[in-house]
Image (cartoon, rainbow, N blue to C red):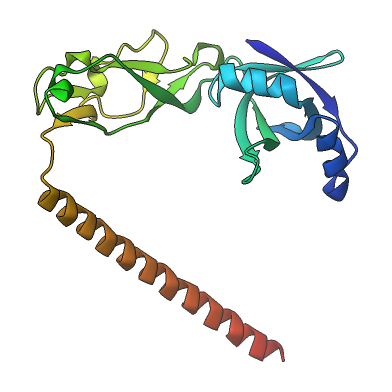
Amino acid sequence: SMELKGETREVFGKSLKALRRKGFIPAELYGHGVENLHLSVAKKEFNRVFREAGENMLVTITMEKDKRPVLINDVSFDPVTDEVTSVDFYQVKLDEKTRVKVPLEFTGESAAVKAGGVLVKAMHELEIEALPAEIPHGFTVDVSVLAETGQSIYVESLAIPKGVKVLVDPKTVVATVTAKMTEEEEQKLSAEVSVDTIKVESEEKKAERETQSASADTETEKA
């Protein structure tokens, strides 16, 4: 696995700005039955490892004499600069299988798409279970097998390495080629989608209002 140097940190809150300015990222390391550690990692090093390992491959955090096998569990980005602002590492046990979502990488050219069809990617990641060291970086989906409109690629036709258990129905569609929609069909579809979105939003608002009035009641009781 790839190695990343971690240092325990004593700074928190507002002092983290200075830490970031020096080229470090604040990090948390935790796991099942593991004491939570506050760390910092060099931004340059982390970006390199994150590019190659992503959020599903084993990384070894090294601290002086201590080595910890981890997965990059959560990464926060600055909404303006898109730079990494903090990281969570999840410590795993090398002999225990773990569940992760592995990205799908689409390659190749489909004759059906060339002929005017539309490639619909129904999945972008696949949930699997494997030993930390056996988690693949990604699964390749070759769309060149889609020669005609209406053809699909299913989970069962992906090349899954030994020791990796897929947690999705093998008959699930990964990608399919549909006929190009007419403008009318596209409008109809987007109208249906926006109606559903409005419905969902109004339900959320309703729930929000109920929560607010409930908390207002508690306030009155307190007074």
Q: Nearer the viewer, residue 78 or 139?
A: 78
Residue that appears at 25% across and 64% down: 195
The residue positioned 13% from the left and 49% from the top of the image is 183
- Residue 139, quarter of the rendered image: top left
Q: Position of residue 212 (x, y in %)?
A: 55, 78
**Residue at 16% of width from left, 21% of height from top?**
114
25 left or right of 179?
A: right
Left or right placement of residue 4 versus residue 187 in this view = right
Residue at the far right: name it.
Answer: 10
The percent coordinates of residue 204 (x first, y second) are 42, 68
Quarter placement of the N terminus:
top right
Q: Image quadrant of residue 91? A: top right
User: Observer-nearest residue: 12 or 77?
Assistant: 77
Q: Quadrant of the C terminus?
A: bottom right
Residue 57: quadrant of the picture = top right
Image point (9%, 28%), residue name? 150
